[in-house]
Structure formats: structure tokens, C-alpha cells
Image (cartoon, grey):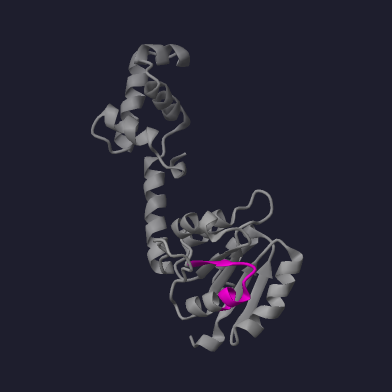
Amino acid sequence: MSYAERRLALVDNGPLALSLLVQRLPQWVPGIEIYWYTDSGDQAVRKCLNPDSSPDVLLLDLSLREGESGVKICRSIRADDDSVWILGMTSYSLHHYANDLAEAGAQGIVSKGDPKMLALAINTVCHQRVFNPLEETTLFQPPTSAHKRIAEQRKESKRMRLSPQEERIFELLSQGYDYATIASEFGVRQSSIRTQAHRAVRKLEATTLAHALVLWVTRDEDWR
């Protein structure tokens, strides 16, 4: 695909900002096409994951409507897609979002109020290079690498997920309760609690119960 055919999609919940970007971006970055735009993160995920509407580049506002996090939207797309180049944009300090956005699989971050930076960032990712305006070592990866990393994390998360009852047992064990006390709370035999605890140990592929408890206590949010 030639550079002149790059399709850009926009996500911003501010009507004025969205309208301005739709009008100005083709002027700031000659050769791009505004493929579609929306104020809904959920709709953006659906469009990006649909081969018939997937853009080459997604410019994603990181402060969307209540309940929609731009970082989470980015991660939702990247978990199932290895081709869309995602740029996060924000009116806040870039430092506020940069590390979380990189971890979520984006290819760069830009200041929403800086047209020169926006144009440079879009040009950069259109040429399939990550864009990092910050000096520190925030690691933005290309889509294929980021997708592979996040897909593996999701696979690991699903493999390690415990049932609600197993989680409650581990919660009590981590607080120092013994099998007998926990069995009393559940109204079951002590042997039943022991069996469930050791089944959870196998799920976590731990070597001992103590090892499994360490893994569970230090778990990432994706485990929950």
C-alpha cells in the first residue's frame, strides 16, 4: 500500500475537537484519508477489528466519555489486531499516559493541542515507525510485536484465572487462616478446602501452596 492511500480513523468525544481534526488533518498531513470518525470507544473497537472498516492508523483520544478509557480501548484493539497503528492523543501531560499506553500496545503518544506534533506523529506511523516525543525510555512497539506480547499476556491471564471460590480461599489463606477455619466459613469439610486449594496450585502451575499464594497476591489486574 502506498503512503497516499493511508486511511486514518479518529476517536474523540469532543464534537468541536473532532470536527476540527476531521477538517484540518488532511491539510496538515497531505495524502491521508479520513476513513471514519466516532465519539465512541466501543464503536472504534468494533470498526478496527472488522476487516471491512479497519484503518491503517487510529488517532485515539485518551479521555473519552465516562466509563471508556482510551488506554483500555487501545489494549482491546491490540489484543486481537496486529496491523492498526495506534496513536494516543491527550490534552494532559504526555507523561501521565505514556507508560500505560505503551504497555497497552500503542505506537506513540501526541499532544492534542500541538498541530506540528500531530502531523509529525501521523507521518511517522504512516511510514511504519513508532513515535516517542519523550526522552525517557517509554517503549512503544510496532503493532505486530505489541500484539504478540498482549496476546501472550491474555493467554497467561486466562490460564491462571481462579474460580470465585478458589479466590476466596486464597484470600483467606493469605490472611493467615487455616483450612479448618475456612471450611467452617464455607460450611464444608476441611478436606474439601484442601482439595480446592491444591487444584488452584495446579492452575497457577506453582510448585507449592506457598508459591501459589505469592503468585496470587502479586497478580496483575488481568487475573481478576
Farthest residue to the right: give it. Answer: 16
Q: Residue at x 32, y 23 (%)?
A: 195
The reply to whether the magenta stretch includes residue 132 is no
Give the magenta range: 108-119
The image shows a total of numbered marks equal to 0
Residue 164 image offset from top left, x and y in percent:
47, 31
Residue 57 image offset from top left, x and y in percent:
54, 73
Q: Is residue 80 left or right of residue 11?
A: left
Residue 12 image offset from top left, x and y in percent:
67, 64
- Whether residue 82 is situated above or below residue 200 in the rendered picture: below
Q: Is residue 215 left or right of residue 88?
A: left
Tell me, yes or no, if residue 141 can be seen here: yes
Answer with the quarter of the image where residue 211 lies: top left
Q: Residue at x 52, y 80 (%)?
A: 123
- Whether residue 187 is situated above or below residue 9 in the rendered picture: above
Q: Residue at x 72, y 62 (%)?
A: 14
Q: Is residue 65 left or right of residue 217?
A: right
- Whether residue 97 is situated above or below residue 134 in the rendered picture: above
Farthest residue to the front: give it. Answer: 135
Q: Residue at x 40, y 68 (%)?
A: 144
Which residue is at the front of the view, 96 or 24?
A: 96
Farthest residue to the left: give it. Answer: 207
Which residue is at the front of the view, 195 or 30?
A: 30
Residue 152 image offset from top left, x and y in percent:
37, 54
Answer with the quarter of the image where residue 219 lies: top left
Tell me, yes or no, if residue 56 can be seen here: no
